[in-house]
Image (cartoon, rainbow, N blue to C red):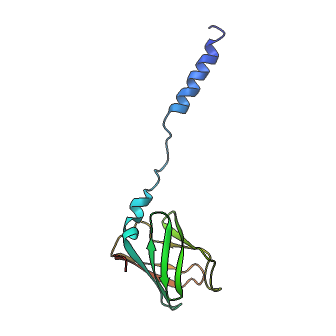
Amino acid sequence: MTRYAQPIAALICAVLVLAAPAVSAAPPADEAASMADFFKGTLEVDNPVGEWSGKYFFEPNHTYKETGSDGPVTGTWSIEGDRFCTVPDKGPAAPDRAARYCNLGVGRHTGEQWKDNDPVTGNMVLFSLKAGRN
């Protein structure tokens, strides 16, 4: 072997490794598809024990508007696993409010209803994804 053969072979191997497609254990979920019904619908949230209810309107640009029994709120949302998380633009208005809420619901469709727990109180919260923006 010539004195250049080994370095050239190493370079070729490095290029092949870098050019190979990355293999992922699980492909990332399609965020737009999993939230599509939220973007055209209304998420109604009811905390019967806490006597609070509200409606959420999610946008594809990761913002949301909320009209609730404690007034209007705007903020941002994100997805973490099977949960969507909302963060209001202003901090919690009361001690029984969290600065960030993460609840089940990613991938749900119009007409579905589900339950989760309030992260602050542990009380049951009811969710319903309705058609339209009302």
Please report the residue visible at 51 percent of the width from the left and 92 percent of the height from the top: 51
Which residue corresponds to the image point at 55% horizontal and 32% vertical from the top-left?
18
- Looking at the picture, how far across and down is residue 62, in whole percent? 50, 65
* Place of residue 9 in the rendered image (x, y in percent of width and height, measured from the top left): 59, 18
Q: Quadrant of the N terminus?
A: top right
Viewer can see residue 108: no
Q: Is residue 40 above or below residue 15?
A: below
* Front residue of 71 and 84: 71
Tell me residue 92's x, y (percent).
63, 80
Based on the displayed image, in which of its 4 quarters is residue 8 positioned?
top right
Viewer can see residue 120? yes
Q: In the displayed structure, does residue 71 sit left or right of residue 2?
A: left
Q: Quadrant of residue 31?
A: bottom left
Q: Image quarter for residue 37?
A: bottom left
Q: Residue at x 54, y 88 (%)?
A: 70
- Picture coordinates of residue 17, whole percent (x, y): 55, 31
In the rendered structure, the answer to whether residue 48 lies left or right of residue 119 reads left
Left or right: residue 42 versus residue 21 is left
Q: Quadrant of the C terminus?
A: bottom left
Q: How many marks?
A: 0
Give above or below for 79 relative to 125: above
